Image (cartoon, helix red, strand yellow):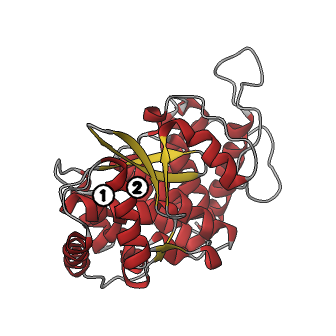
Amino acid sequence: MTEHLRHFARELESQTAHPERLALHIGGLVDGDLDVGHYLAALDDLANEAEDRLLPGLTGGDLAHALLHVLGEQMGFQGNLGNYYDPGNSFLHLVIEKRRGLPITLSLLYMAVARRMGIRLEGMGFPAHFMLRYQDDRGSWLLDPFHRSVVQESEASSYLTGIFRQPVHLHSAVAEYTVSPRLLLLRLLHNLRNVYLSNNIFHSALAVLDFMVLVEPDEPELWRDRGLLHIQNGKMLAAESDLRRYFSRRDRLHLFWQAPEAAIPGLPGLYWEGDPSTSSGDSRSPTSEEREVMAALGHIRAAIERAN
């Protein structure tokens, strides 16, 4: 376990940990010597600068617009439209340095800077897009740091429809899309993992999953994905251990010990589109996904036997 991963695990257990500190430790994936304290001080400086630029006494929508103007227009924090899938967009320390990022990392930066100014912004995890919400006694507004827009809550669906140029229907009240710091981090890590997977950088995707399982240790699919990535990296004992956790978290540990019915050529992928239902009326029978994981276990055990 790297030093940053250890600090990340400790911070997660703290009741006072802020998401920006945790996000900075994720930066240890690309810089093992990253000085988290340096970037926390940089956020302090950004908050001081932003506070000096904001007109005093602003509230409501005026404050929401002013935050976007100061941080986005004047201080230069913008969406990286030209290189959206650059992994660097997911690392907060690089966003602080380059002032370019994704919707979620820009939102995280806004939240951290605003909190230092005594302003509370909430993360909003809408479908395929991350935004912020500001509320006071004058009302509630959505902020989009990536596109530098302020939106009324009632306009959320039409705004997202305009961004994606296809209908976006929100199936819950806007407040239901508020995310906790843990869910924010998990979404950030999910984005980063997918970038690495799409480029077949399996060792980096595996390192991201080391953080993800700390954030959500009871999520079976994270153990499944980490186990499959261990196979890609030739770590068969670690793969077997993680797939055992996958079945255990699903309360299906009997399938871990059961031999697969048939081997599946090659290794299973990390994106699942099969029928999640069981293949028969027996609830103990494996689903299509579980059968693929069982086939992967067969591959693992054969490799371990050959090695011994």
Rendered image quadrant of residue 75: bottom left
- Give the CA separation, mark 1 to mark 2: 7 Å
Q: Earlier in the sequence, mark 1 or mark 2?
A: 1
Q: In which quarter of the image is the C terminus?
A: bottom right
Residue drawn at x 22%, y 82% as measured from the top left: 38
Instruction: Find out whether the residues at labels 1 and 2 contact each other: C-beta distance under 8 Å.
Output: yes
Disc 2 crowd, CA 10 A, few/some/many (<14, 14-19, 20+): many
Q: In which quarter of the image is the N terminus?
A: bottom left
Taking 257 as reference, is 168 left or right?
Answer: right
Residue kind at label 1, given as amino acid type: Pro
Residue 196, visible in the rendered structure:
yes
Q: Is mark 2 on a helix, strand or loop?
A: helix
Residue drawn at x 37%, y 49% as measured from the top left: 61
Disc 1 crowd, CA 10 A, few/some/many (<14, 14-19, 20+): many
Taking 145 as reference, is 199 left or right?
Answer: right
Q: For residue 19, which numbered disc appears in the image?
A: 1
Residue drawn at x 38%, y 78% as measured from the top left: 74
Q: Name the residue under label 2.
A: 185
User: In terms of depth relative to the viewer, which is nearer, 266 or 204?
Assistant: 204
Residue 103, compared with residue 253, is above or below; it is below
User: In terms of depth relative to the viewer, which is nearer, 142 or 194?
Assistant: 142
Residue 235, visible in the rendered structure:
no
Residue with the most extreme top position: 281
Image spot of residue 22 (x, y percent): 30, 62
Q: For residue 98, which numbered disc appears in the image?
A: none
Q: Is mark 1 on a helix, strand or loop?
A: helix
Taking 246 as reference, is 8 left or right?
Answer: left
Image spot of residue 65 (x, y percent): 40, 59
